[in-house]
Image: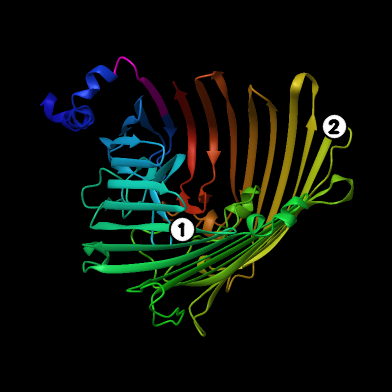
Amino acid sequence: MIFSKWRPVLCGIGLVVLGSGAWAGSALAEGRVQASNLLMHQVGRDPSSQETEGTRFFDHLQLDYLSGVFRYGLRAQVYRTSESGQVYEEISQKYVEWRSRNLKVRVGNAYATLGRGLLFRAFELPGVVREVVTFADVKYMDSRDLEGAVVEGRYGPVRFQALSGRPLAYGDNPPGVDFLLRREGTVSGGHFDVDLGRGLRLGSGYLRGDGFHFIGRGDLEEYGSLDVTLDGTRLLPSLADAGWFFNLYAEYAGKRWTPLLDPFSTADRNPHALYTSAELAYDRWSLTYETKDYRDFLLPYNDAPNLVPELAPSLINRRSHFLVANDERGQAIGLQGAMLGDWNVHYERADARNGEDPNLMRYRLNFLEVSSPPLEDTRGTIFVAEGRDDLETLSGQKTVGLSLERSLVDGYSATATIEYQQIERPNDETSPNDVLVSATVSRAGLGSASLVWEQSNDLQVADDPLTLDIETSSRRWLGVIVQGSLDRNHEVAFFAGKRRGGTACTSGTCYLVPDFSGVEVRLTSRF
């Protein structure tokens, strides 16, 4: 019974050791080990039930052994709860990697991105612990890897990448739940690009997927892509010498599409994805412009750019937009710079549209932030924003905020922030609002302590779905956050109180975070 319980752990370690072959014995004496661990312990209310208190424990361990041109890796995660919920323990990753000057081969669990992710992207969100309460109360590390092999290399002006294996196709499904799939089907393909000189690079990708029956994609599907990159600093060195920088990128992908042979088409009847980006910078100013046009391109293994800005204000980030890659077109503009007197300006505009009239759904965000230079050890930031998101039944939102930061004695600093948001929903004339107030004291190299208070009278938030009553009074959250370094190898984060959930986005990937009430401790260790 004991062997059966720990069989996944023993098998995973065995595969890593056996993969090294006879060489591993002598290499242990000359290599080095890297280790990291993230531990989370919670005591508080289970957001998926009406129980007042429960304990939850999550641990994620990563071990890497490096010797010469080889790297061996192993990851394990464990989740336990005092409630009658889901528990699990598993070896989540194991791999062997060989690297030379121009070639890298990784077998096992790997990451890869073809182009900008229109065809394929296997990735992780470091430090992000997903919390799912829909099917069962489960926590897990968000790592959407490929179980197979990835080869990357370079030869002169040519770069190439090849992959094959089983992707983690359903990253929102937690591990350990028997009736939910996480891996299904297989993919294979690759990408190459060649430097044509003068800053022009041309690339092409190919991917085939088969066996994704869970979402009705059981048949073999093939996709092709073409991308072009133009580096302005190499095209016109004189402009680069004058302080200018610009870069252009465009990528088109289609189903059963062959680059240079089939025509480019963004017609609705043709599954496609078109992404473009332009960057321009001079002195302390920068301008970015991106576009997207996606149709029937929600694949279980791709991750096309979302084009929704990730901003500092909490109330705005909570209204982030979820990408609908089956039918979405839009653009994003970003402008940052410094005016006279060192006043900093940051402007973002993003919009998207899904479907057609009369079922057209829109997303829009306009954001403007102005930060002052330090005035007698005090720096101020003010922002305004407005937008809408029909997908979230949000017909309008207006947000304002102010933040003041002041330097104190002995390297300490204090920051105070207030944000106010008024929202509009269809057939709702109450004009609900959200308020956030926070205060933080911090010291570089030591840590910080924060007090965060929020209030909302939005009926979609005020009503507790776990009760039969319809609550209409405002909901309030008050929490204390303390985080810092215990030493150079350990970092701790402590939370106590009530924390508001909602949408969170990291590196362009959005996910839902549930509410929490209680005490939470996170310990991150690195060796």
Which residue is the extreme one toward the top? 29
Measure how far apart labels 2 and 1 are at the Cα level: 51 Å
Q: Quick check: can you spot residue 116?
A: no
The reply, left or right, for residue 246 in relation to residue 358 is right
Say if the magenta span includes residue 32. Answer: yes
- Nearest the eye: 453 or 387: 387
Report how many numbered discs are placed on residues in the image: 2
* Viewer-nearest residue: 65 or 355: 65
Q: Position of residue 120 (x, y in %)?
A: 38, 58
Helix, strand or loop status at disc 2: loop
Left or right of 321 on screen, residue 288: right
Crowding at mark 2 (Cα within 10 Å: few <14, some 14-19, many 20+) = few
Instruction: Name the front one of labels 2 and 1.
Output: 1
Residue 456 is one of the magenta-drawn residues: no
Name the residue at 41% across, 67% down. Answer: 225
The residue labelled by disc 1 is 194
- Start and end of the magenta stretch? 28-38
Taken as a whole, is the magenta stretch helix, strand or loop? strand
Above/below status of 466 relative to 480: below
Residue that appears at 89% across and 50% down? 340
Mark 1 surroundings within 10 Å by alpha-carbon count, few (fewer than 14), some (14 through 19), many (20 or more): some
Amino acid of disc 1? Val
Q: Quadrant of the N terminus?
A: top left
Residue drawn at the location 29% of the way across and 44% of the way down: 175
Amino acid carrying label 2: it is Asp
Which residue is situated farthest in the bottom direction here?
A: 358
Does any portion of residue 158 appear in the rendered image?
A: yes
Specify whether 42 is left or right of 432: left
Q: Secondary structure at mark 1?
A: strand
Residue 216 screen position, x and y as percent: 25, 68
Numbered label attached to residue 377:
2
